[in-house]
Image (spheres, rainbow, N blue to C red):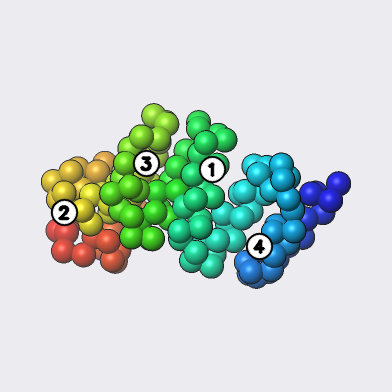
Amino acid sequence: MVTKQVIRAASGWLELGMPDDALEELNGLSGEDRQGRKVLELELAAQMAKGSWAGASSTARQLCGQAADEPDFFLSAAYCLHEAGETEEARQLLSGGPEVLREFPVYHYNMACYLWTLGEGDSAKEHLDKAIAMDEGFLDAAKTDRDLVGMEF
């Protein structure tokens, strides 16, 4: 019962844009309750809202382990790794995620960003082209993305 109350409180803090308070609520949990999927999802959201990329990547990877078929956790983990400066690890994690990821344009867009950052221009362009073919909105995003500076569209 306490866990549900903590989850409600942490969710409320997040909705109010107060990730530090959400994390404080969650940190009051211990043991098995602390490792529950919903708790970890809220922790991840709060860490990402704060820009705590290293912690968020660790939390997201825990979620990948708990739900290996959930593509969002792999996208989040890779994004956090990239933001923490671990772009090669982000690329490896995302490319090793569930096959269903490849059906999402954001997978190809993020791979384009990681590959471009790593100096793999041809592969980056291929992934960006796939993302744009799947969702034209990614063209506008690419034009202003700091990770794709220097790429021709």
In which image quadrant can residue 20 be found? bottom right
Vertical placement of 137 versus 52: above or below?
Answer: above
Which residue is labeled 4 in the image? 23
Q: For marks 2 and 1, give the CA distance.
A: 29 Å
Q: Is residue 105 visible?
A: no
Q: What SS does tag 3 mark?
A: helix
In which image quadrant can residue 133 be found? top left
Q: Residue at x 64, y 53 (%)?
A: 42
Q: For marks 3 and 2, give the CA distance.
A: 18 Å
Q: For marks 4 and 3, give the CA distance.
A: 26 Å
Q: Given contact means CB atoms under 8 Å apart, are the residues at marks 4 and 3 in contact? A: no
User: Outermost residue toward the right?
Assistant: 1
| Label 4 neighbour load within 10 Å: few <14, some 14-19, many 20+ | many
Q: In the image shown, does 87 or 27 lie closer to the viewer?
A: 27
Q: Residue at x 23, y 49 (%)?
A: 115
Horizontal side of residue 74 vs 38, given as left or right: left
| Label 2 neighbour load within 10 Å: few <14, some 14-19, many 20+ | few
Which residue is labeled 2 in the image? 119
- Sequence-wise, the earlier of marks 4 and 2 is 4
Q: What SS does tag 4 mark?
A: helix
Label ID, residue 93: 3
Q: Amino acid at mark 2?
A: Gly
Q: What SS does tag 2 mark?
A: loop
Q: Amino acid at mark 1?
A: Gln
- Sequence-wise, the earlier of marks 2 and 1 is 1
Horizontal side of residue 64 vs 37, given as left or right: left
Q: For marks 1 and 3, give the CA distance.
A: 13 Å
Of badges 4 and 2, the one in the foreground is 4
Which residue is labeled 1 in the image? 62
